[in-house]
Image (cartoon, rainbow, N blue to C red):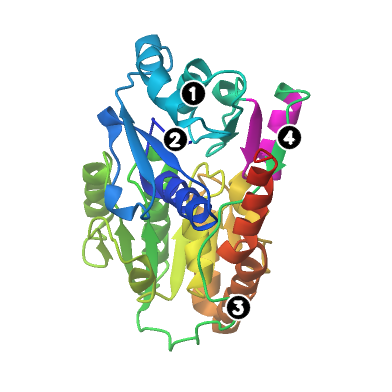
Amino acid sequence: VNSVLGDARGGRWQVVCDYSRILAESGHEVLLVLNRQKLPDLERLPSGVKIEMVRNHGHYDYLAAFSARPRLRRFSPRLAIAHCSRSVALLKRSLGPETPVLAVSHSNKVRRLLPADAYIALTEHIAKQFETSATGKPSYRLPNMIPMDVTEQPAPHPRHRPVRIGAMGRFDQVKGFDVLIEALALLRQQGYQFEATIAGSGDQRQGLHNQLAEAGLGDCVNLPGWVEDVPGFLSRFDILCVPARSDAFGLTPLEGARASLPMVLSAASGHREMFEHDQQALFADVDDAPATADQIARLIDDPQLAEAIAKAAFRRVAECYSETVVSEQLLQIINKYNQ
């Protein structure tokens, strides 16, 4: 069983789909359990995966667990994978003790995942939290992954004039796009010429639009909405910025590295575990617009530095976070429960 009943958007949904596809391609029969109240984009699902819908209203929805029990037990799963705390709660109540529940952390908050029987931690930081809070339960360190051709790095393209800066993600407070806009305003004040695009959607869209107008950036910063063709989108830029206030192990930096883009990242814990500062990316403190502006300026002023860290980031992702590498590690974990 592979399940997500809570937030099933963006990177988390991509990881759920990746797990389902890799397990199905490896010969496992996969039942994906989803919430009718929060249906994701089902077009991303791989073929050969069964779907079971439940109507779940929260962590304490005992009726949903009771209703799902006969359907899930009929599948006779050897393992249940939970990608959110709602899924942990429902699966633990619906399945008998003979079916272990493996929780996958998608954030730095682990408390509600603790009732699971084992854990997948995206970072060492999260793994330490599990070790401290859930003594004796197995915890596996497994990062997010990205499909890529590890044999050939994209050739660097001529830098645009003016330089193009990209960003993408959900428009909510945690993503820090307001910090990026403030940094861009500082760069404009310092005389830098650029074109910037922040792709995405969400509740903060109007607030970001208003901030751009107040900063006088409406002529050089675009909010085009959500993009589906991420590689095509990233190919248009010279620099990628990920200013998140918190990021357990997001996919956007992996996608930027795959595209050989030099990146300015916030110093969120997940980013710091992905890459080394000044080697594979440049970092700015969380919520620090002046530092973000300074690091973007370094990449604008020093094309050789930009090219060097882009190449190093690609190699890092190819060696550590490519689907070929991480899927093998995932299957090793799953097979522990397939005896």
- From the top left corner, tell me how far across and down residue 136 is, in percent: 78, 24
**What's the residue type where badge 4 is placed?**
Lys
In magenta segment, residue 252: no
Task: Give the residue displayed 52% in from the left and 78% down from the top.
Answer: 301
Looking at the rendered structure, the kind of residue marked 2 is Ser
| Whether label 2 touches label 3, CB < 8 Å | no
Residue 151, compared with residue 28, is above or below; it is: below
Callout 2–callout 4 Cβ contact below 8 Å = no
Q: Residues within 10 Å of mark 1 (few under 14, many from 20)?
A: many
**Which structural element holds mark 1?**
helix
Are dots 2 and 1 in contact, CB under 8 Å?
yes
> Between marks 4 and 1, how big is the CA–CA gap?
24 Å
Q: Which residue is mark 4?
A: 128
Q: Earlier in the sequence, mark 3 or mark 1?
A: 1
Image quadrant where residue 218 sits? bottom left
| Cα distance between the residues tagged 3 and 1 | 43 Å
Which residue type does callout 3 highlight? Lys
What SS does tag 3 mark? helix
Asked which quadrant contains residue 326, the reply is bottom right
Q: Which of 31/231 is in front?
A: 31
**Which residue position holds label 3?**
311
Residue that label 1 marks: 91
Q: Mark 4 and 3 residues: CB-CB less than 8 Å, in contact?
A: no
